[in-house]
Image (spheres, helix red, strand yellow):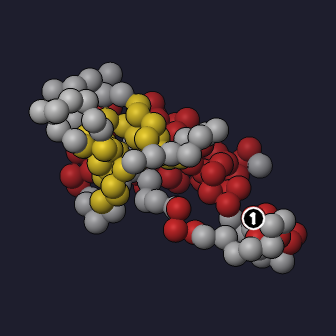
Amino acid sequence: MNQTLMQRARYVQIFANLSKQFWAEAVNTACYMVNKSTLTAIDLKNPHEVWPEKAYDYFGFRIFRCHVYAHVNDGKLDPREMKCIFLGYATGVKGYRLWSTEEGSTPKFIMSINVTFDESAMGNQVEDDISQAGNKD
């Protein structure tokens, strides 16, 4: 299982063009995907389909490193959303792990459930945002 997780994490990290500082996020996302995927031991079903005997909804999967707008309420005159990059799923709580890429703020991890995904904004712009965020640390 360790080899499987590391191979998937390596693929996710290379596909997302991330620096090595985000390796833990790639492994956590790979683990989440393995736990939600189908298994040959149970007739190509995932554990969520077998135990509660209901179909699993795969709409929760999101594209790793896509643009995300986290909704915030910092003040009456402050912006209501913060531009971030999706880096995986939060553990122990409902929500997503995000990397803040807002201009003028220090890069940081954010966990939020109230987000809007922009999976159409893929490509060079996201890669530039990630490389700039990785260079600030």
Extreme residue in the left direction: 77
Q: Position of residue 66 (x, y in %)?
A: 35, 54
Choose between 64 and 75: the one closer to the eye. Answer: 75
Callout count: 1
> Relative to residue 105, is residue 85 depicted above or below?
below
Residue 58 point in image, percent of width and height: 58, 69
Q: Is 16 on the left or on the right of 24, as rendered?
A: left
Closer to the camera, 95 or 133? 95
**Residue farthest along the right direction in this orientation:** 41
In depth, the one of 6 and 47 nearer the eye is 47
Q: Quadrant of residue 81?
A: top left
Q: Under tag 1, what secondary structure? A: helix
Q: Residue at x 62, y 57 (%)?
A: 33
Quarter of the figure that contains the C terminus: top left
Asked if 51 appears above or below 18 in the picture, the reply is below
Q: Residue at x 36, y 28 (%)?
A: 108
Is residue 103 toward the left or the right of residue 59 in the image? left
Look at the picture and state if 37 lies above or below 94. Answer: below
Residue annotated with mark 1: 48
Please state the horizontal and vertical placement of residue 19, each as a whole percent of the image: 40, 37
Dot 1 amino acid type: His
From the viewer's side, name the closer residue of 79 and 125.
79
Along the horizontal axis of the image, is 127 left or right of 59? Answer: left
Residue 114 spot, x, y in % from top left: 39, 48
Q: Is residue 22 depicted above or below 36 in this figure? A: above
Instruction: Determine the residue positioned at 60% across, 70% down.
Output: 57
Graded by Cα atoms within 10 Å as few (under 14), some (14 to 19) or many (20 or more), the crowding at tag 1 reads some
Work out whether residue 62 can be spotted: yes
